[in-house]
Image (spheres, rainbow, N blue to C red):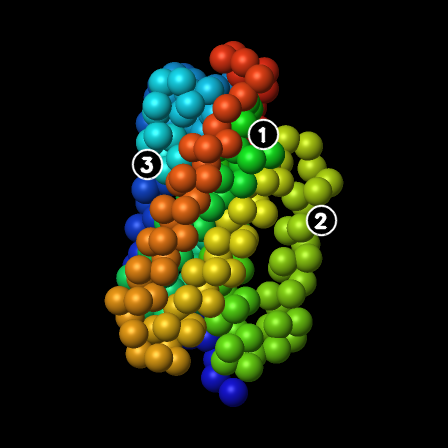
């Protein structure tokens, strides 16, 4: 039995820094720290189906995963990312980890639009759920007990949280988690077992591309004006 290393996670740290910088920019543009309303930058970068379908603002599929609606929102997500990223990144390598994160982020955007295309949605938790999903796949492949390692309870707690708290993007969490399971399986099977690193990265890219295509396909909404703000946390 092998353990998952827990040191050396520069990509995780860099992603956290990027998220914090983006949140500072959001606050400077008018987004209150307590999340009472959305500022100008957040509205231009948040996931929103009508803007993607009618204005072709496809960047929202990516930028929404680096934006947050309040201090509590970003604090929770960054802590979550730090804990699971610090375990997964050293285990599969920096490049693979970044590929898993980005593909899961895009899969989370697909899931969020599939469930609620006409609600402003922001947050890194779709990608974080993906990292958790990949971590579970990697741990299982290395014969690390899921429940004894704490990964099982972590997943269960987050599922309960997602279903019980209002304003949570269930589709974003579910999409990101599925993306993480798929990319994690690709890394384990192709990079680790077969020694084919390029194939593993290509599989992650393919999952991201499919997610983008799916997100654009379901981006249609019931109107052009957002009636609320949903966010992943």
Residue mark closest to the camera, 1 vs 3: 1
Marking on residue 116: 1
Is 42 left or right of 132, judged from the image as shown?
left
Quadrant in the rendering for residue 54? top left
The answer, for residue 107, to whether it is visible in the render is yes
Q: In this orientation, which residue lies closer to the viewer: 45 or 196?
A: 196
Please name the residue shown 29% across and 74% down the image. 196
Measured in 3D between alpha carbons, the distance from the residue under mark 3 to the one under mark 2, in whole angstroms, is 30 Å
Residue position marked by numbered label 3 in the rendering: 21
In the rendering, at what x and y percent does residue 147 appear? 66, 71
Q: State the SS at label 1.
A: loop
**Image height of 155 relative to 218, above or below:** below
Q: Earlier in the sequence, mark 1 or mark 2?
A: 1
Q: State the SS at label 3.
A: helix
Residue mark closest to the camera, 1 vs 2: 1
Residue position marked by numbered label 2 in the rendering: 160
Q: Are marks 1 and 3 in contact (CB under 8 Å)?
A: no
The answer, for residue 101, to whether it is visible in the render is no
């Amino acid at each position: 039995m092998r353990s998952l290393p827990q040191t050396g996670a520069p990509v995780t740290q860099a992603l956290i820094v990027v998220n914090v910088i983006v949140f500072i920019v959001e606050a400077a543009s008018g987004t209150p720290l307590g999340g009472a309303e959305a500022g100008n930058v957040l509205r231009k970068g948040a996931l929103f189906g009508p803007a993607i379908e009618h204005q072709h603002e496809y960047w929202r599929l990516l930028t929404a995963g680096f934006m947050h609606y309040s201090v509590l929102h970003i604090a929770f997500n960054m802590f979550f990312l730090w804990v699971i990223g610090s375990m997964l990144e050293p285990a599969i390598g920096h490049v693979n980890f970044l590929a898993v994160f980005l593909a899961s982020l895009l899969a989370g955007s697909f899931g969020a639009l599939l469930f609620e295309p006409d609600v402003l949605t922001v947050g890194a938790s779709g990608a974080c759920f993906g990292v958790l999903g990949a971590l579970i796949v990697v741990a299982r492949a290395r014969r690390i007990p899921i429940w004894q390692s704490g990964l099982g309870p972590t997943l269960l707690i987050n599922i309960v949280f997602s279903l019980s708290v209002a304003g949570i993007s269930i589709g974003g969490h579910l999409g990101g988690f599925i993306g993480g399971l798929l990319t994690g399986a690709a890394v384990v099977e192709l990079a680790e077992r077969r020694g084919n690193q390029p194939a593993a990265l290509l599989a992650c890219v393919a999952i991201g591309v499919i997610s983008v295509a799916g997100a654009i396909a379901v981006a249609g909404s019931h109107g052009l004006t957002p009636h609320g703000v949903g966010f992943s946390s």
